[in-house]
Amino acid sequence: MNLSMKWLKEFVALDPMPMRDFTEAVTISGSKVEEYHTEGTDIDKVVVGRVLSITPHPDSDHLLICSVDVGEIEPVQIVTGAQNLKENDLVPAALHGSTLPNGVKIKKGKLRGVESFGMLCSLSELGLTLNDFPYAIENGIFVLQEDCKPGDPIQQAIGLDDTQVEFEITSNRPDCFSVIGLAREVAATFQKPLTLHTPVVKGGHGSGKELLDVAIEASDLCSAYCARIVKNVRVKPSPRWMRERLRVMGVRPINNIVDITNYVMLEYGQPMHAFDLRFVEQGNIRVRRAKAGESITTLDGVERKLNESNLVIADAAKPVAVAGVMGGEYSGIMDDTTTIVFESACFDAVSVRLTAKALGMRTDASSRFEKGLDPNNCLPALERACELVELLDAGDVLDDVMMDGTIEVQPRRIPLEADWINRFLGCELSAAQMEEILGRIGCRLDGDTVVVPTFRPDLQHKADIAEEIARFYGYNNIPSQSLPGGAQGKFSARQRFDSAVSSAMLALGLSEITTYSFISPKYYDKIRMPVDSPLRRSVVISNPLGEDTSMMRTVALPSMMEILAKNYNNRNAAAALFEPAREYLPTEPDKLPMERKVLIAGLYGNDADFFTLKGIVEDLLERVGVTGWDIAAASDEFSYHPGRCAVLTIESERLGVLGEIHPQVQENYGIGERVYSFTLDLDLMFRCAQTEKHYTPLPKFPAVTRDLALICSDEIPVRDLQKAIVRGAGKLLESVRLFDVYKGEQIEAGKKSVAFSLVLRSGEGTLNEEATSSVMKKVFQELEKIGALLRS
């Protein structure tokens, strides 16, 4: 939406200010300015000149030598080829060093040996057309008929000194598609009074009731329709002030009648149309749906087929306009038109939009109607058009307004909750301040209720009222406040724990992956899940992307195996991956599943084996503070090798499983290497982790080191030996470390040699040989209980 600053100042008396300050202020208040442009800035040193004398060129039969008064001490000599000049004509004179709109620089020079100190300009050389100055001629010098004198800047003389501001108007603000609507916004922004003019029509030229009858037959698509007749129409060019405003607003001037309808549309935001009454059969105007098979030739000369969904303005026999979009060619204004009908109506927004789209026509009128207009604006706009007819002496306005429908609509009422608005905005405004701000945009208070004007359909709720108050109070005036609430600006304990787990896995050389939580039922077959396993009862997705993503996984192993298989197929020699994944276990019908967060890892290659995997688990649990866990061999885990698998427990709860993947599972995924994997319950790990750090002073007394070499059955797990040592040594044991496991010729078949290094220390004094021997004796007793003897 373009806006003429000259036109705006008729409604708002703004203080002088730079355009940059103006545009920034209205943009901050909510009326975004895209750009602005002052006319005539591309013209320099072009002034009004008076032709004092004209003499023929001595060496040319078509050039003339003109002496031109340009307001300086001496007249200047300019050579021209135009033949439409005479003495005393006022003309645009481009002097030496001047610039024209097309970027041409004018310099003095010689034409056929005669010096010329400038150029006399045509209309087009100033960037204008005959629509802007109808009295000019197209091919010749622009002879001015304006009230000006030699030396006046041409911009001032012909009105090229206005500033055009382009606003970006959102579709929920139909009122701002008008000069008055934007003026109201500007007045509210700068806290200036808005001066509105009430149209006054003198009339007195008889009644129009006998000449025209108006009726709405499709009241669901047209809420209001009013019309007024003008007779003795005198079609001629509009005055300069109207042409200037239309030009700045981006509308081409045509003639006074058409220009009046465009002028009112721009000023009031109410599209209008004018019919030649001669072509309205029987003087009947009906607002109805089009009939099957009807067509109309619109003002652009295109015949358009209509259907029953299109709303039309029709006479007794045929459509004369497509309602809200474009008039018909046959009933348009012509040079010999003597009696016209001005139309002002309120059509349904959806109907206009669908019709314009179906017929391939988008006009200034349809773009306004489709946003929803104020029915209360119909009559004032019609009166303004008739007032302009009388002002421009364009015809005689008849007395009666023919109308149908609901011309007046009651305003909406919204409760004013001052306390809520202050909490919502974070400010402290009184009810009186709010009333003053709302009054600037046309609202008024009736007790504790805001009466919203009908031209503001976007104000629907109390939040909308709060927004209006914020806009014109000034967003920059609202104090900054921290957001209230109990949200902590830091990671929770669980988030820190999960991060520590991921960091530990990365430090151990594994790479993190992320997989989808939904899989295919066939994946359960690939990991050898029994048919009757409760884990097959998965949550089914109602609208899956496909069969491979049709349900939520109950185990994370299939997702890990898919990624390992992809790496293997891409010929990666080794892979070590992990994922903090979620498993979804169904509960009762119609209830959400139980989400369990697990840590799953998978690896192959690099000579990895069961003990590589076990070492990763032990190191991980130690890093994150999980202690007191046990490990036991397992042979009934369906996805794992029955002889190379173990289950971890802590506090009698299953912590997880680790081991070599079953050969059949590896084959199902097409992996030709041994694959190792573990799954740990992250929720249980978090509950059991000792995350608090306790200070331990540095030891004051030296430690005693003892190495043990034990002989035991090959069936006894090393972890059981460690437990026995811990039980025997008690509080004096600082650490125990396995450093050798040996099976060979010197060891009896079915047995193994296991060596540990023990560190003993007392906090009360130095351990002597007697105290040390007593501790070691208890250790040997505990080892003997499980069948382990000291190796001789």
Image: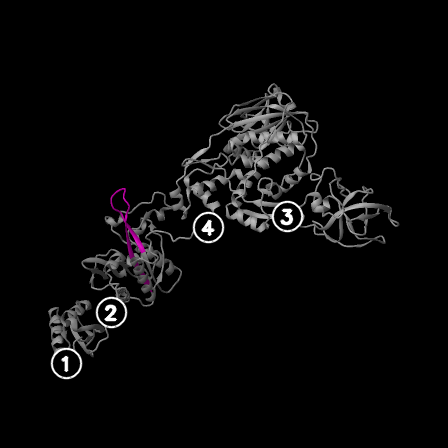
User: Which of the image's four quarters has the N terminus?
Assistant: top right
Which amino acid is tagged 4?
Answer: Asn
Residue drawn at (56%, 41%) of the image: 183
| C-alpha span from label 1 to label 4 | 79 Å
Magenta span: 581-604
| C-alpha span from label 2 to label 3 | 75 Å
Q: Residue 242, how many percent across, how many down? A: 65, 37
Which amino acid is tagged 1?
Answer: Asn
| Mark nearer the N terminus (3 vs 4) | 3
Q: Is residue 84 magenta?
A: no
Mark 1 or mark 2, whichever is nearer to me: 2
The circle on residue 38 is 3
Q: For mark 4, what is the residue? A: 477
Q: For mark 2, what is the residue? A: 695
Indicate whether 365 appears above or below 741.
above
| Mark nearer the N terminus (1 vs 4) | 4
The circle on residue 768 is 1
Is the C-beta separation of discs 1 and 3 under 8 Å? Answer: no
| Mark nearer the N terminus (1 vs 3) | 3
Name the secondary structure under disc 3.
strand
Mark 1 or mark 4, whichever is nearer to me: 4
Indicate whether 530 appears above or below 301.
below
Q: Is residue 656 rendered to the left or right of residue 264?
A: left
**Circle 1 crowding by C-alpha within 10 Å: few under 14, some 14–19, many from 20:** few
Residue farthest toward the bottom in the current orientation of the protein: 769
Indicate whether 578 appears above or below 287.
below
Q: Is residue 727 rendered to the left or right of residue 37?
A: left
The answer to whether one can see residue 534 in this image is: yes
Name the secondary structure under disc 4.
helix
Which amino acid is tagged 2?
Answer: Tyr
Q: Is residue 711 rendered to the left or right of residue 614?
A: left
